[in-house]
Image (spheres, helix red, strand yellow):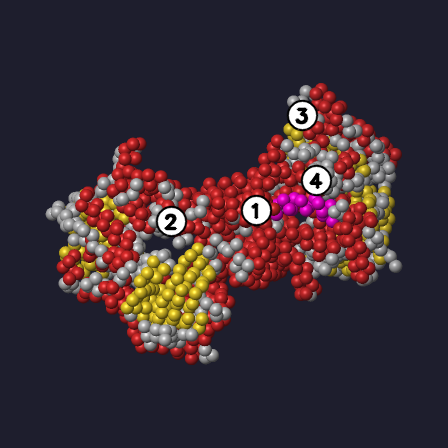
Amino acid sequence: MLRYTLSRLLSLGVSLAVASVVIFLAIEVLPGDPAAYMLGLNAQPDTLAALRDELGLNGTLWERYADWVGGMLRGDFGTSYTYRSSVSEMIGERLWVSLPLALYALTLSTVIAFPAGIWAAARRGKAADVTVMGVTQLGVAIPNFWFAMLMVLVFAINLRWFSAGGFPGWDKGVWLSLKALTLPAVALALPQASILARVMRSALLDTLSEDFIRTARAKGLTKGQALRRHALRNALIPVLTIIGMQFSFLMAGGIIIENVFFLPGLGRMIFQAISARDLIVVESVVMLLVFAVVLVNFMVELAYALVDPRLRARA
Amino acid sequence: MSLLEISNLDLDIHGAPILRDVSLSVAPGQIVGVIGESGSGKSMTAFTVLQLLPEGAQARGQVTLNGHDMLSLSEAQLCRLRGNEVGMVFQEPMTALNPIRTIGEQVAETILIHEQVSKSEAMARAREALNRVELPADRFPLSRYPYELSGGQRQRVVIAMAIALRPKLLIADEPTTALDVTTQAQILALLTRLVREDGMGMLMITHDLAVMADMADDIVIMQKGRVVETGPAATLFETMQHPYSKALLAASTHAPDREDGTTEQPLLTVRNVVRAYALPRKTLFGAPGQVQAVKGVSFDLKRGESLGLVGESGCGKSTLTRAILGLEQVQGGEILFDGQPVFTGHAANRAVRRRMQVVFQDPYGSFNPRHKVARLVTEPFHLLDAPPTGAARDAAIAEALTSVGLAPEDQHKYIHEFSGGQRQRIAIARALIIKPDLIILDEAVSALDVQVRAQILDLLADLSKRFGLTYLFISHDLSVVRAITDRVLVMKSGEFVERGPTAQVFDAPQHAYTKALIAAAPRLPEEA
Amino acid sequence: MSTAVTERSLGAQMLRNRNLLIGGALTFVFAAAALISFVWVPYAVDGVDIANKIKPPSAAHPLGTDHFGRDILSMIMVGARTSIAVAIVAVGIGMLFGVPLGLWAAARKGTLLDEVIMRGNDLVFAFPSLLIAIMITAIFGPSAVNAIIAIGIFNIPVFARLTRSGALALWQRDFILAARVAGKGSARISFEHILPNVANLLIVQGTIQFSLGILAEAGLSYVGLGAQPPIPSWGRMLAESQTMISFAPHMALFPGLAILLTVLGLNLMGDGLRDIFDPKLRRGR
Amino acid sequence: MMFKPFRTGLVSALALAGAVTAAQADGSLTVAMQLEPPHLDPTSAAAAAIDSVLYSNVYEGLTRFASDGSIVPGLARSWDISEDGLTYTFHLAEGVTFHDGSAFDAEDVKFSLDRARADDSTNAQKGLFAAIDTVEVTDPLTVVVTLSKPTGNFLFNMAWGDAVIVAPESADTLQTTPNGTGAFKFADWVQGDRIELVKNPEYWGTPAELDEATFKFISDPTAAFAAVMAEDVDVFYSFPAPENLPQFDMDPRFKVLAGSTEGETILAMNNKLAPLDDVRVREAVAHAINRQEIIDGAMFGYGTPIGSFFPPHNPDYVDLTGLSDYDPEKSKALLEEAGVALPLRLKMTLPPPSYARRGGEIIAAQLRQVGIEAQIENVEWAQWLETTFRGKDYGLTIVSHVEPMDIGSLANPEYYTQYDNPDFRAVIEELSVTADQAARSELFKQAQTTLAEDYVAGFLFQMALLTVAKAEVEGLWVNMPTPAVDLTSVHWAK
């Protein structure tokens, strides 16, 4: 297990290193001068030069890369060009919106998808199955921003059950904050839940057709018992893979949704940062998201090993 | 009074008739063997008893188990019976166990499902059941996972689950088909012992007459969903009436009419061949370990000879075959074909390779399903420097197909339009088309039903006569090897343990392993 | 036993498959709309008619008009062109690079090359796709071409992985061994034997990726990074209608439905094709 | 048909709900706007959002804008100007303290002005201070500013947000902790969401009526609509989606304030790029444009047509729209006369605001009618600044010039318009040294006419300031002489 973990960690490190170079180079070729953006139409050349110097935009490419990576390793993501405050702090603050949102959506999608997928698999071919498959087919096809628009119209403007967006802050009350995250989480979770339910169903049907299910039935287990005791855990591996992929998608997919609901999260921050040429923020947030994705995949792989003794042994 | 009584059973699946008018009975302590070729409906009969039928199945008739009318019980009632009054053992032990739960949990589950006992008591009784199937506690603790066990050991776990509650009836569906011959003998002995000890009735399903001849009390022969012959095993072989039964018996013991065409000229020479594989690295930087699959073997194959290579799975015979075909480089020794090495430098020697061809086991997997027969059988033309085209190509295809008993027009069909036996004929046609000297038959008849197998063996004998072919016949099935070869090599753990003329080796085996192998092979009564 | 079922003619199976029929019909409608738009649309979409802006559906404008007085039906027809073109090329990029990479990796399984190709795939997967698409279009400017590239890049590992896993299974089959016995090299085998046999998988996945491509294009256009005006695009139509949804819902409804139905159609078609190509995966209907 | 049940359902549901939740804490107000300030120091960035939140609320200058655009005393209660117009003596207010408790005096004024015009200054409007020669403190309440040349606009310049007075001790930390002298104190900033201000109890002037004010940042126009409708905010300053205003107008809970801004929205042309360097081609472009269609289509009717680079609400405004009326036939004739090969392809870069993006699409469609293919390129602001504004790599672009009295900027041949007319430069030069109002007025009119006759740009419309507020909110600025949401006299109707 340890050797397995170590070798996965090594490849994690390599992935991150390659990613950092790619991200840095990609961002550096972005046209647009952050100093010019900050100073606007009437800026004078000497003022611009002074600001560029102050922002550390005049070093060589290599120096800036080394600064950036070195800083990140120390937990210092640098100082935002436009906000003039520590990127680490900004990320930390925004993370308190994006992360709960992603987790909320993930929880929602799991809570919806698991029973739906299991139900459909158990009632394969029956009305329940057809219904779940039909609804999820729609759920997969619906663009989440369009769904968000429709929800705002119905629930925020028309019924006024929820606020149309914004985020009060956790210090204003957990309940209020969760309420503010509900519509965005639902918008994010719907397509994810649909995918997950379908994966759950087909993974279950796959395991249900395995020989060992027949063995279990021959022992006297009912269909339901065979499903619960033998099929579910075996079906978990493909489901875990999807959940892992979904987490990263939710973190990034929040970009649009956070904008629709004007939530002060990482997604909105990165959009603003791109339009303001706040390179250091863009770099750092993208890197952070890549790191999160790689990390989640890593944890998913460890989770496989927990589910499957064969993997544990091979490791 | 019989334990299991099936009478006038009809079964349809989605309207297609599967069983018609099936009747049989099993008494306590009795072993009844149901025999038939694939598609005869024998497995469906077993599943009907347990009512574990696929969706869309419709059964009519009477199935009475220990007084229960199985066709009219509710699902809940059936669940109480399954595992409790009737246990079942399946064909494929590799997949019959849940890979992520321990063997202890899985055996104990049978008990926990049916009786109100504590987890620890169930585990203790699971231990007992495992002991009974000869999986002792010191080597097979309850915490073992299935992947840590061999196929035979897994089958024992499945049996332990089936007999944990000492059911009245045990149903075994081809329980040894997937196992090696020595393991098969052990499992059959185990089942017989358990039946005798517990006074269970056993319904055993198999395609192998010989297996049943040894152990069954009664035999039921099925064909196309109908029972064609029933009778006590002791006398059935003499008294059988139905032409199908007779044909089945004849095919099972069939030996093709052939003559020894061995010459003195060696065609293939294998000298001290070593084939080793690298093991996965144990540490990140250490040198990877090695495992030797073939440990320095030597033999000569003479022109016109038919040489058998016998061994159980994992003995190294497939590895050796691949080396002979020049598909993989060997780590030691040399392989010469007619004096020339099959592997030169890093590439196989085309000049040699075009003179050997191979026929594989699986008639379904050995053809690209997207190509027509003409393209399939002409694939070896790739080895020729100037492959025939146009009319010459058509003639070659027609000749190859005709010589294996197919029509030249068959070249325009796709492979899925043929039966398993026909496919194997096409595989032979593919091997013949470039007129090779040597054909390697890698388990070439193992997957076929017994009657088809007899036909293919006849074909092979005939071709050998007509074209003066040399065969290297690789199989785990002793009866087939005995029927078709002049000389035999017995392989175990990468080495030859015994070699000699076929008749001599089978009649008077010298090595202990050969003896065990031959003893384990089920046999039909001599006089039949 | 199952041969009787699988060997029913392909055409008959297709006609019996409800998913495929519905999906095919939906896809056909939108493909046809896109094609027809090349020769005829109810109204030109490159002009404005401010006097007729934001009209609800009527006989003259079956789906109403937008905020510039343009006919929404015509916009959706021409927009289908954009969506389909972007998705086709993006899937094409994915297949063009991904399939050979997957074949190559499978043929050299376990070697350094295989490892490098698969790690490269993992790396691309590790980037949040939408974010990278936004970055690419931010760097090189928003345009349909850059959207295609951004979407296409993320299709490469999808096809590479799928091809590799399908090919690995095939490499175990005896008919590949037979081809090797016939002296064929791995490149030849890959294209002659492996590729035709993974084609079904690729078609099914291609259909799915196609629908994802349409969704991705809509998403990018929605944030203004897809096709640029005056080229109509469903995603941008949605973005532009967003502020008017409360008093002109038709402007948001129809482009949204167009996306929904097209993606739904493609997904249904993919499911249907999967049912037919791979009976093992067939799930009760 | 399909709208009716929907809309009436919506409105009645809203009206009901509104009645229930109308209870509003009297002393607090939530103002929404689109852009969030990047930081909170108005003296070191151009972002208008900084001024919008903080101008006059937190920071004050020597003079200040009144809601009608006139210049009124700020921290300088009065001033004397020397005969030659070169020396300004400011008399400062008494008893003023900064929010951190330190006292305000003349030294702070000197520090602020010197800091803004220093060599390493990062002030975005350094030009405002260009004329200052020396700043001298004569006593704690008196500052004398000497100019190097007479500057008619000096008091006006000192009213800008970039010229507010800051304290030397806190000058470096203003970006996160603003420290001014205004009627509100900075309380909290949740980045990406809101800034909170509280009433300054020690304010030296008329105290604010509100106890606290929250600025919320909602960039998405849909979200803006939803937020107002849901009454999450009380005021939406510069509402981004004019198409929604009729709904607010119909709704008794809200009022719409349509005022004027200093924003001349123009279709800028690259005067040096062939064939736009030919005045006939520029005139052709101007005649191809249908202003009213743009105002209706892009702004849903909000906006005043302009014929030159000058706001219509200014007394010196001359209506020159007739020079560039919509006349596609004339346009085609001019193009033919200029010998331009059709279709003429021109790159049109469009920054993010909807006036530019929508206006651009309409203009492109209009230009197509006369054979000009405008190739639209949507860009972010940063890109626009880099490639269009500084790089001058464009043919046409649409932008709203929001700075007050900015007609002079077109006189710079290096400006992105690349308009180079010595006569116009001379007029602007003269303006900067003319203090006499009548003379200035004449010069302004002359400048406007020159620009219109040279067809420097397609002059489109004066941007309207659209503010949506709850019906009970009073005291808001209707017009926007400078970007500011002055809350000092805002209150809830009783």
Q: CA distance from mark 4 to mark 1?
A: 24 Å
Horizontal and vertical percent position of residue D465: 79, 45
Residue at mark 1:
C22
Judge the density around disc 3: few (<14), some (14-19), many (≥20) Cα neighbours within 10 Å.
many
- Residue farthest left in this picture: B264
Circle 2 or circle 1, nearest the eye: 1
Residue at mark 4:
C62
Horizontal and vertical percent position of residue D67: 84, 47
Circle 2 or circle 3, nearest the eye: 2
Judge the density around disc 4: few (<14), some (14-19), many (≥20) Cα neighbours within 10 Å.
some
Q: Output the chain of dot 1.
A: C
Q: Label 1 amino acid?
A: Ile
Q: Total of numbered circles in the picture?
A: 4
Q: Output the chain of dot 3.
A: D
Q: Mark 4 falls on what kind of element?
A: loop
**Closer-to-camera residue (D357/A68):** D357
Q: Mark 2 falls on what kind of element?
A: helix
| One can see residue B248 in this view | no
Residue at mark 2:
C170
Q: CA distance from mark 2 to mark 1?
A: 32 Å
**Closer-to-camera residue (B68/A124):** B68
Q: Label 4 amino acid?
A: Pro
